[in-house]
Image: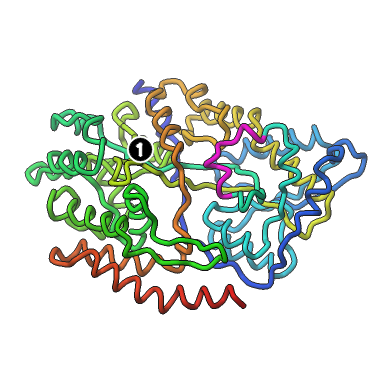
Amino acid sequence: MKKKTRSFALLAALLAFSSVVSACGGGKESTGNQAGDQGGKEGTANSGKVVEIVAWDMPQDGDVLKPFWEQTFKEFEAKNPNIKIKHVAPTLTKEREQFMTAVVGGEQPDLYNNAFPDMESYIDKGIPADITSLWQQYKEKDKFLPSAMAAATRDGKIYGIPSFMYVTGLAYNKKMFADAGVDANAALKDWNSFGEAAQKLSSADKGTYGYALLGMDWADWFFEYYVWQAGGDLTERQKDGSVKLTFTSEPAVQALQYYKDLKFKYKATQKNVVQSLDENLNDFYQGRAASMISASNWFGNMVSNGMDIENIGFSALPAGPGGSSPAQVGGAIWILNPKASPEKQQAAFQYATYLVSKEVQDNLLKYQSENGIFPNLLNVRSDVDASDHVKGMPEELVKNVQKAADEGRLEYFLKARLSPYVVKAIQQVLLEDGLDPKKVMQAAQDLAQREVADKYNAEIKK
């Protein structure tokens, strides 16, 4: 196992998480007719007409998977000689800005791999094509996880093809739990049991603590999960598209009180609760933090930083007062240009579904295994399993990742605009013991209502 672990450690990467960029105005709503009219027609590859499309799908130079994808491109074109693809590599940084510039300039690519969080605002602006008719006639549509399809769906209509996804949960150090006499199954049962276990796992003498809490500028990223576990959310999207703030709802206040308890009652977090995510991760790698929230595609970095894959546990988060353990799902979705011709949309759909076919996804896992690349343990397809291709992978770890995705949710509505207000409230409570979470959340909501919600709701009525 150690030999295989060292090979896993050769290559791995964290998914880059960024804030949602506000979609620009001026986009027209797609009727869906262009893509839909092609749904029942003969495939583009067999139509006899050469169709050329632009896909922003070329990996960057140095990407360890670039050879695999370039070979896949060739295989597709050999099987579909009537589809010619111009493969474009998006910029390494500020890709969203580059894409939106292309949209505004009338140069939106025929196929673009878009992040889950952006779908909501992009659909509002008519940026992705309505591909419902194409999707309904796609023979493998039932092979995709419901949690993967959620971000691509609005009011029963389909606006994209999921290409990649991850799920969040609690990663924990099995040895630290065992050394402290903490049973993981009992500890991860609910908030109370976890708080007590995290306290037991904390030792000033040893320089260890139970839970690496995220309190920096992305604090609401993980905090929202606890609001979900308490049975609520931070916002509600109304039927007319407007936003209702629910910072002061009982679930949100309970979640903030629990954060406060982890810090001051259980004394189970790091001293500097506003340290960076990288510092949290390093504490986990080095055995200082016994647990932290993680994503299903982070295990490669854990291994490459010296952790033994057999010593890493993963679970859905401990259930909160709401009695459930929802997890955040994220990832990417192929979207089509609504202004492209029907033939181009058909070709783009055919190409995108090939890239996420079982054949290609299985080949990807095989390539990763043969080249010492640690894979993401969650796939958008229900019929693709990483454990079928990776020797030495703990079966329990894969199963727990897949189980965590059963209750997948997308991040709270209008997060990009509201995040600073929620983060400030979280940090205030974590940094000053005497504050009342409800009063702090009320102040945050009042300010966010004036500065964001009222303006947003007025905008959408125009």
387, above or below 454, in the image: above
Which residue occupies the foreground of this view, 239 or 351? 239
Amino acid under disc 1: Ala
Name the image quarter holding residue 338: bottom right
Q: How many numbered marks are there?
A: 1
First to last magenta residue range: 141-151
* In the displayed structure image, the side of residue 198 where residue 336 appears, left or right: right
Q: Position of residue 226 (x, y in %)?
A: 32, 50
How is the structure coloured here?
rainbow
- Mark yes or no: residue 60 visible: no
Q: Main secondary structure of the magenta part?
A: helix
74, above or below 54, in the image: above
- Residue 143 among those drawn in magenta: yes
Pointer 1 residue: 316
170, above or below 33, in the image: above
Q: Where is residue 456 in the image (x, y as percent from the top left)?
A: 51, 74
- Mark yes or no: residue 380 visible: yes
* In the displayed structure image, the side of residue 331 where residue 113 appears, left or right: right
Q: At 39% across and 73% down in the image, what residue appears?
A: 448
Name the image quarter holding residue 173: top left
Q: At 28% across and 46% down in the image, what residue appears?
A: 321
Q: At 59% across and 36% down in the image, what residue appears?
A: 144
Looking at the image, which residue sits at the far right? 48
Classify 10 Å Cα crowding around label 1: few (below 14), some (14-19), many (20 and above).
many
* In the displayed structure image, the side of residue 363 where residue 435 appears, left or right: left
Q: Where is residue 67 in the image (x, y as percent from the top left)?
A: 62, 37
Looking at the image, which residue sits at the far front? 239
Q: Is mark 1 on a helix, strand or loop?
A: loop
Quadrant housing the C terminus:
bottom right
93, above or below 55, in the image: below
- Residue 135 among those drawn in magenta: no
